[in-house]
Amino acid sequence: MSGELDIQWFPGHMAKARRMLADSARMVDAVCEVCDARIPYSSRSPELPAALAGKPRLLVLNRTDEADPAATRRWADALRAKGIAVLETDCKSGKGVRAFPGAVRSLLRERLAANAAKGQAGKPIRVMVAGIPNVGKSSLINRLAGRKAAETSDRPGVTRGKQWITLGDGIELMDTPGLLAPKFEDKSVGENLAFTGAVRDDVLDTEALAARLMERLRDLAPAAVEGRYGFHPEPGCGGTELLALAARRRGFLVPGGGYDTGRMAVTLLDEFRGGKLGRITLEEPKND
């Protein structure tokens, strides 16, 4: 197998979510866009700028515990060089989350100064938490709130409507549904979103997806494949063959002596998403 997969997913509720975000923008002071540190480019929703034009934005690189630390530093530096406010977080351990209120206040320092001048220093700060599905928006909110204020899941598309969550430091958060582009023009974007679980597995050919992931890992992180599955992925080896090699190593057999690549596909995707292959970032900052 070779070549990029053409993956598309835009369920009906996302069209409604796009309208809701645009309608709700007038109610907030700023936007916190959460993305996946393993795919900082692919996991930024191209729908947000149009829906939230003019709002100050904080970009949260979440799941840093699953991304390559050196790559995360490169991404953070590249984004800040473009004038983008960046916060790096790991919602599993809580690392970086405590810096959120300060980052928001820094982003809105001019607005807060103007409020103070008008005698409105205690006015709550309203922040919309937005992004694509399954990047940890609700997990971030729950960490900030110190309680289960938003529903979380490892499946995309759980949050369907907006809800307000009040923090203890004068900040109110609006949780919003995940929003993808109606069409992925860049096939690598669709692949990366599928690899990390932002696209529902039941609309995908899981075996083809896992074979493609094997090819990406062969090129980006061959040591991770060798460490997890016990063989070195040779450069000329295709994804389907690599998947079969992994199935053999795991002892995943089917009647008649063949290898259960379907079972191995599910295992590979689960283990990659769970961080069991190590901290891997799938894309690098672009020079433009």
Image (cartoon, rainbow, N blue to C red):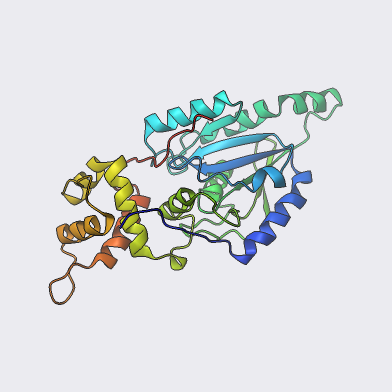
Can residue 159 be seen here? The reply is yes
Can residue 161 be seen here? The reply is no
Residue projecting furthest to the right: 118
Task: Report whether 288 appears left or right of 105.
Answer: left
Q: Which of 223 and 173 is in front in this view?
A: 223
Residue at 16 percent across and 61 percent down: it is 248
Q: Which of 178 and 136 is in front in this view?
A: 178
153 in relation to 93, above or below? below
Residue at 71 percent across and 47 percent down: it is 51
- Measured as percent of width and height from the top left, residue 21 is found at 70, 51
Residue at 72 percent across and 56 percent down: it is 19
- Measured as percent of width and height from the top left, residue 8 is found at 52, 60
Q: Which corner quadrant holds the C terminus?
A: top right
- For the image, the number of numbered tags is 0
Task: Report whether 161 appears left or right of 205.
Answer: right
Choose top left, top right, bottom left or bottom right for residue 60: top right
Q: Which of 34 and 48 is in front in this view?
A: 48
Q: Which corner quadrant holds the N terminus?
A: bottom left
Task: Report whether 203 appears left or right of 110.
Answer: left
Residue projecting furthest to the bottom: 255
Q: Nearer the viewer, residue 262 or 102?
A: 262
105 in relation to 38, above or below? above
- Measured as percent of width and height from the top left, residue 139 is found at 52, 48
